[in-house]
Image (spheres, grey):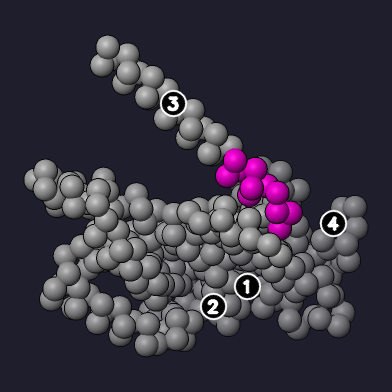
Amino acid sequence: MSVVLESIAGAIGRRYRALRTSRTLATFCANPLNVAGLSIVTAITIAAIIGPLVAPYDPATQDLANRLQGPSLAHPFGTDQLGRDILSRILYGARLSLGIAVAVTGIRLVLGTTIGLLAGYAGGWVDEALMRLVDIQLAFPGLVLALVIAGILGPSLRNVMLALAVVGWASYARLVRGTVLATKERDFVRAARLMNVSRFRIATRHLLPNVAGPVVVLATLNMGTVILGTAGLSFIGLGAQPPTPEWGTMLADGRHHLRTAWWIANVPGVVIMCTVLGFTLLGDGLRDMLDPNHETTLEKPT
């Protein structure tokens, strides 16, 4: 009888989770801004994956006879000052920019989540020491600190990735610590302690899943800022070096031809703007979807 009851309870639980998931997805898709953000991010991701396979030209091949050509059927986004096809460089740059954003965000997430989880759960002098480290890091403007680090290490994409990863982990640590401090006093965590569950198991099985939602939202929003920061550092010469097809470098190449060949700078600029906007809209949508009180919020009269 107990086995039957457990099977029925499990089936009801799975059915409830499925209904809740479908309702949450329906709420997410009901907002056109969420759908727009998801569509933009999906398009950029597809471009990053298959872009080098469908690019019509080699991004580094120069064709001086066709330099500064406007948009046409042969070159939909035109050519730059060296005759390179801008569409091909945009497609190759999508893989580069998105790959850097994923790597930097992943480093920030792992480092910040680990420190925040340790500080919030351990408490005492460990919490004080780690949070003072976080406060020191947050005392410096992020982009300025990244600029200093990249300038000291030298111009390269690897150094830009390291600089952006170093300056961005503190926000994850503070977010995770605050969530852990609120969660570790809840009844299910206290019950786990009374059952002599190990501290590691409590942290990984009970606390970590509760910080996943806010961390995912922050990581999604950070993807856009990392792409913007990478482009900014490359624009001033600290990131990708020619002839690497990076969006910020393409902006820098086109700034001298704004009057005669507007497409060289405007095309990568618009791509950067749309990509950052897409991740911002998607992050806002995920925040509403993963917020446990989002249903109550939606039911309030407007």
Q: Identify residue for label 4.
A: 76
**N-term mark: 3 or 2:** 3
Res. 152 mark? none
Q: Position of residue 252 (x, y in %)?
A: 67, 78
Mark 2 Cα-neighbour bin, 10 Å: few <14, some 14–19, many ≥20: many
Q: Is residue 47 visible?
A: no
| Residue type (three-letter) at the residue carrying disc 3 | Ile
What's the magenta region?
Answer: 23-33
- Quarter holding the N terminus is top left
| Residue type (three-letter) at the residue carrying disc 1 | Thr
Left or right of 186 on screen, residue 26:
right
Q: Secondary structure at mark 4?
A: loop
Whether label 1 touches label 4, CB < 8 Å: no
Q: Identify residue for label 2.
A: 233
**N-term mark: 2 or 1:** 2
Q: Identify residue for label 3.
A: 12
Magenta highlight on residue 25: yes
Q: CA distance from mark 3 to mark 1?
A: 55 Å
Which residue corresponds to the image point at 37% horizontal and 56% vertical from the top-left? 211
Mark 3 Cα-neighbour bin, 10 Å: few <14, some 14–19, many ≥20: few
Q: Position of residue 15 (x, y in %)?
A: 49, 28
